Image: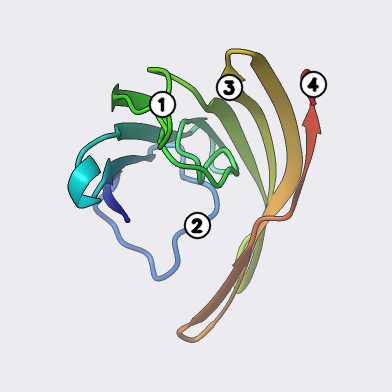
Amino acid sequence: MRGVALLAILGSAAVAEAEPLVLRADQIHAVITAEIEMAPRLFARPVSFAPDVWFGVTSKLTIGLIHSNGSVSRIDRAASFCFEHHPIYGCDRTYHNAGLDTRYALRAGAFSVAARARFLIRDVDPWKPALTAGALLRWTRGKITVTGDPYLRLGLANT
């Protein structure tokens, strides 16, 4: 069993009803994901952290430096920075998974769309870069929200 803790820091005190798909020029959004093994015989082996931070460049463009498995579209154990290694249960090296995430707002409102492109480094040994192209989608009606993140990933090496 794996426990996950999240810490979110917003660069603005204003809270909107629905978080926009891109940030305003004066906003920063950061998330730190901690993954800690919770099994009794393996408690805290491995321990890993993954910081993700996005910056609002303009009112339509957001750029992020991403590390968490969720951000690099990967379902895996162990986040990017491993502090307690365990070769079988994840964290076989100190660092892996990173990327640049760009989002550009195309439409705002009840149905919001942002074009999204990512350059990913899925591993560093061996080097496994990839590009993704897609969109973030959000439809909101009252208290119901449906989101989507369709994309196409192109492996650039070691596919």
Q: Which residue is mark 3?
A: 123
Q: Earlier in the sequence, mark 3 or mark 4?
A: 3
| Rendered image: mark on residue 113 | none
Q: Which label lies toward us, 3 or 4?
A: 3
Q: Residues within 10 Å of mark 3 (few under 14, many from 20)?
A: some
- For the C terminus, which image quadrant? top right
Q: Which label lies toward us, 3 or 2?
A: 3
| Rendered image: mark on residue 87 | 1
Looking at the picture, how far across and down is residue 155, in whole percent?
78, 28
Q: Which residue is mark 4?
A: 156
Q: Which label lies toward us, 1 or 3?
A: 1
Q: Earlier in the sequence, mark 3 or mark 2?
A: 2
Left or right, 93 with reference to 128: left
Give the answer, above or below, for where 134 lies relative to 68: below
Kind of element beneath mark 2:
loop
Q: Earlier in the sequence, mark 1 or mark 3?
A: 1
Q: Is residue 10 visible?
A: no
Q: Which label lies toward us, 4 or 2?
A: 4
Residue type of the residue flagged with mark 3:
Asp
Left or right, 120 with reference to 37: right
Give the answer, above or below, for where 70 lies relative to 92: below
- CA separation in Å, label 4 and label 2: 31 Å
| Rendered image: mark on residue 20 | 2
The tally of labels here is: 4
Q: Which label lies toward us, 1 or 4?
A: 1
Q: What residue sits 74% from the left and 29% below the top?
A: 131
Q: Residues within 10 Å of mark 2 (few under 14, many from 20)?
A: some
Q: What residue sits 43% from the left and 33% below the top?
A: 88
- CA separation in Å, label 2 and label 1: 39 Å
Residue type of the residue flagged with mark 2:
Pro
- CA separation in Å, label 1 and label 4: 27 Å
Give the answer, above or below, for where 84 lies relative to 10: above
